[in-house]
């Protein structure tokens, strides 16, 4: 599996747009964009990539949530590549709705859809057990203090993620967390629980 952040050099405000391709561009690989962002420069970048012969340059788009910095370029991506658009059921423009626990093929790997509300009501993460890779969208997985307020469903999502063997986290903004993703998530869960316990003790 090859993962490329197409917006690493963007000059406009946008999310990370990940193009995910198989190692060998096999005919049954599913070339996938994780989020589409809002920078039109990703389209010529995709057109200039080796995405395999006899198949779509972008076969599917998976949206981690519906915020504008992750979805604005969708009409242009549809026009250029005619992909299947997948998202959580509340995103009306999707062609296919994803549910928690569902397994989807991305490039030459399989990923588990994990519903992770907190940043938004429709946030999902994408987890590949084989490579220990997690696409996290804008879900905050790197909380380093015990300040803040954390809802039940967000903590439950962290608990689910903490059971996974995660090496690398590809976030919706910023650089990947490489090598110790599961440690980062467990620390975040601990801090969120401590914050909740402290607030409960004050009430």
Image: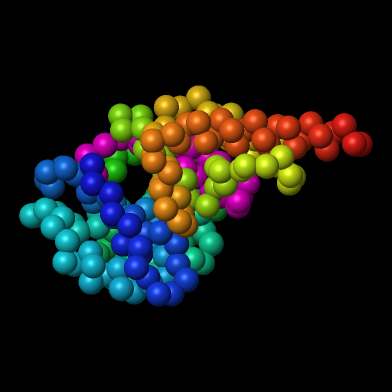
Residue 94 visible from this viewpoint = no
Q: Residue at x 54, y 35 (%)?
A: 185
The correct choice, above or below, for 39 with respect to 142 in the image is below
**Is 116 positioned to the left or the right of 193 in the image?**
left
Tell me which corner region of the image, top left, top right, bottom left or bottom right, holds residue 39. Answer: bottom left
Residue 177 visible from this viewpoint = yes
**Nearer to me, 125 or 83:** 125
**Is 13 positioned to the left or the right of 48 in the image?**
right
Q: How many marks?
A: 0
Q: Where is residue 197 in the image (x, y as percent from the top left)?
A: 79, 31
Tell me which corner region of the image, top left, top right, bottom left or bottom right, holds residue 51. Answer: bottom left
Q: Which residue is drawn at 38% across and 35% down?
A: 179
The correct choice, above or below, for 56 with respect to 10 in the image is above
**Is 197 positioned to the left or the right of 34 in the image?**
right
Q: Position of residue 131 (x, y in %)?
A: 31, 33
Q: Where is residue 162 in the image (x, y as percent from the top left)?
A: 53, 28
Specify the segment rendered in magenta: 107-128
Question: Where, quadrant-wise, is the N terminus in this rendering?
Answer: top left
**Nearer to me, 105 or 84:** 105
Q: Residue at x 42, y 53 (%)?
A: 175
Q: Position of residue 58 (x, y in %)?
A: 24, 57
């Amino acid at each position: 599996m090859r993962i490329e952040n197409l917006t690493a050099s963007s000059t406009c405000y946008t999310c990370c747009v990940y193009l995910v391709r198989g190692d060998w561009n096999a005919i049954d690989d599913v070339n996938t964009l994780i989020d589409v962002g809002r920078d039109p420069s990703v389209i010529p970048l995709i057109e200039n990539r080796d995405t395999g012969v006899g198949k779509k340059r972008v076969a599917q788009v998976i949206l981690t949530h519906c915020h504008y910095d992750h979805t604005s370029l969708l009409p242009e991506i549809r026009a250029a590549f005619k992909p299947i658009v997948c998202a959580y059921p509340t995103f009306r423009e999707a062609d296919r709705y994803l549910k928690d626990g569902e397994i989807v093929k991305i490039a030459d790997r399989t990923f588990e859809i994990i519903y992770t509300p907190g940043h938004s009501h429709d946030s999902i993460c994408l987890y590949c057990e084989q490579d220990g890779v997690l696409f996290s969208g804008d879900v905050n997985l790197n909380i380093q203090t015990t300040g803040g307020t954390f809802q039940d469903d967000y903590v439950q999502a962290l608990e689910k993620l903490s059971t996974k063997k995660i090496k690398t986290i590809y976030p919706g903004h910023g650089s990947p967390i490489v090598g110790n993703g599961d440690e980062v998530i467990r620390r975040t869960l601990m801090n969120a629980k401590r914050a909740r316990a402290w607030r409960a003790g004050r009430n």
